[in-house]
Image (tube, grey):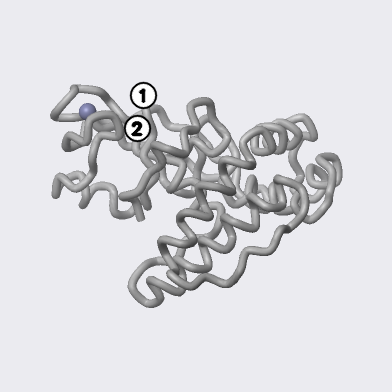
Amino acid sequence: MVTVGVVACVVERRLAQGRLRCPACSGRLAGWGYARVRVIRGENGVGWRLRPRRSRCGGCGGTHVLLPVSCLLRRADGVAVIWAGLAGKAAGLGYRPVARLLGRPASTVRDWLARFASRAGAVRGLFTVWLCALDTDPPPLAPAGPAVADAVAAVTAAAAAAARRWAGRLVSLSPGELASSVSAGLLLAPGFAPERANTSSS
Ligand SMILES: [Zn+2]
């Protein structure tokens, strides 16, 4: 089962219009019930119930869960919280202070940071490509320091470029939401593959 990062409020319309494509074969996805309800932990301890739409590909028959960009696959915390943790690490904080700031278990935060650090170079490369695709003359991306900081800086710069490019035409995406969308929800999950990253979601 693969996850497609899309803004929740447009999923049904896109499904009905046949505008969502299978990440495996590019066939058209149609509604196919719902995945199980889960509770996502948001900022300031505010959680929300998520009932992800499930879809089925008319080409290969595979089923896919359509996850909103506010979430990451296999993570119970919303991407805003996780991204705040990654930004804290990029700013030089260790996992224990980040965990205290966010009110999350230290072991959970350590896991986020380790997973992100293990692919920081790939994330930086992917989002540098996006930055240049979104802005033909982007502000120079200065080295931010450690690999995690460089990766966070690249995602943040790409989100800013997206906001400039689509100003007034698109609900703006935060850096964390952009990271979720482009990675198809796999930013911190097994199977993160920059070469197959999502290029059709908004
Ligand atoms: Zn397919």
User: Marks 2 and 1: CB-CB under 8 Å?
Assistant: yes
Question: Tag on residue 1?
Answer: 1
Q: Is residue 159 above or below residue 86?
A: below
The amino acid type of the residue labelled 2 equals Val
The location of residue 88, given as percent across then percent down, is 76, 52
Quadrant for the N terminus in the image? top left
Whether residue 56 is visible to the viewer of this picture, yes or no, is no
> Within 10 Å of the Cα at label 2, are there few (<14), some (14-19), or many (20+) other Cα atoms?
many
Q: Name the outermost residue toward the bottom.
A: 168
Q: Is residue 167 left or right of residue 78?
A: left
Q: Is residue 167 left or right of residue 138?
A: left
Q: Ligand 1 falls in which quarter?
A: top left
Dot 2 lies on which element?
strand
Find the distance from the CA under tag 2 to the CA under tag 1: 7 Å
- Name which residue lies at 36% across and 39% down: 4
Q: Is residue 143 above or below residue 45?
A: below
